[in-house]
Image (spheres, grey):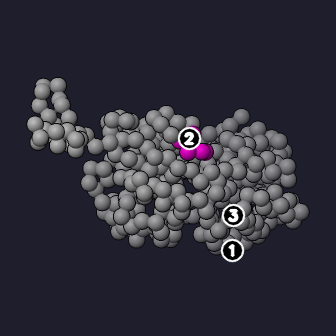
Amino acid sequence: MQRRALICAAGLLVASPNGYTQPARKVYRIGVLGSQLTASDMAGPQTRSPTVNALLRGLRELGYVYGEHFVTEPRSSEGKPERFASLAAELLRLPVDVIVAPGPALPALKQATSTIPIVMTGAGDPVGQGFVQSLGRPGGNITGLSLQSVDTTGKRLELLSELVRPAGPVAVLWDRYSLLHWQEAEVAARERGWRLLSLEIRDAGEIEAALTAAGDARAGALLVFNSALLDRQAGRIAALAARHRLPAMYGLRFYVEAGGLMAYGPDLIDNWRRSAVFVDKILKGAKPADMPVEQPTRFELVINLKTANALGLTVPHSFLARADEVIE
């Protein structure tokens, strides 16, 4: 009786239907970091976050049941990148078995832990940003998916110039978290003889003044790099760009859904769904150090025709034919 009481108290065994006892199933804790919605919007088996829902869908496709095999521990910076350090510390104290996070959260996570596995849902340049040693062999506790957004900076500038043919400089809205993107834009502009106007900001309160400066400088177009700070302001940026008559190119489609002109980049929702594959392998014992980073295979060009019309732009049929989606 004493042995049985000890076992029951430890919670190591549970009764099975046939009367035998079996080890209790571990319920994994998956930390999920976000940068836009609140943590409550990201919580539970069905959330208000399209990206978190994509992760949950990917796990369901692999046979995982929420509450039976795993639960999520969501945290969000709510557009304040400086909060990622404290959020990472919260997750480590729980602790969690693995953390799924977007690119903007990775610097804080890399500094916070070298042991908890981290699955990135999209980093602009994982090697250049120092998150992994190489795409083929990450070598640390971080793996996952790349956005290749740094590599495609030149392509976004080309598409923007092809549609708009700006007479003035192309204004570039960026912050310190997108420094590599700005540096790549400078290289691409030098090679092609384009003029750029740097609009570096430190917080969301500087966005309106930055775009006003672009209008005053008679910028012919606007390029916006995605970051935790800017992404949360997508609708506001799109509205300000329209006010200053600035045709704008973005790196992710939700800017276009918020009223922006066009975006060229990978399918972010698919990246989050694919991240479930990495989570699954890690929970089954795989080491992030040995799991190659996956690069996007499909990039989408999304155009908001209503915004184009409001800006007085005529989008050629040949350009529309290349778009993966046209929002009317």
Q: Position of residue 151 (x, y in %)?
A: 55, 64
220 or 232, which is in the foreground? 232
Look at the numbered discs 2 and 1 and tell me whether their residues touch, using CB distance below 8 Å: no
Q: Position of residue 322 (x, y in %)?
A: 62, 45
Residue 169 visible in the displayed image: yes
Between the C-alphas of marks 3 and 2, the distance is 29 Å
Q: Residue furthest top?
A: 17
At mark 2, the secondary structure is helix
Q: Residue furthest front?
A: 2
Look at the numbered discs 3 and 2 and tell me whether their residues touch, using CB distance below 8 Å: no
Between the C-alphas of marks 2 and 1, the distance is 45 Å
Residue 188 visible in the displayed image: no
Q: Position of residue 286 (x, y in %)?
A: 28, 56
Q: Position of residue 206 (x, y in %)?
A: 78, 61
Foreground disc of the pair 3, 2:
2
Magenta stretch encompasses residue 38: yes
Q: Is residue 31 above or below residue 186?
A: above
**Within-10-Å neighbours for mark 2: few <14, some 14–19, many 20+:** few
Q: Is residue 88 above or below residue 111?
A: above
**What residue do we see at 77% from left, 44% from top?**
308
At mark 1, the secondary structure is helix
Magenta range = 37-42
Q: Which mark is residue 190?
A: 1
Residue identified by numbered label 2: 40
Q: Give the mark nearer the N terminus: 1 vs 3.
A: 3
30 or 55, which is in the foreground? 30
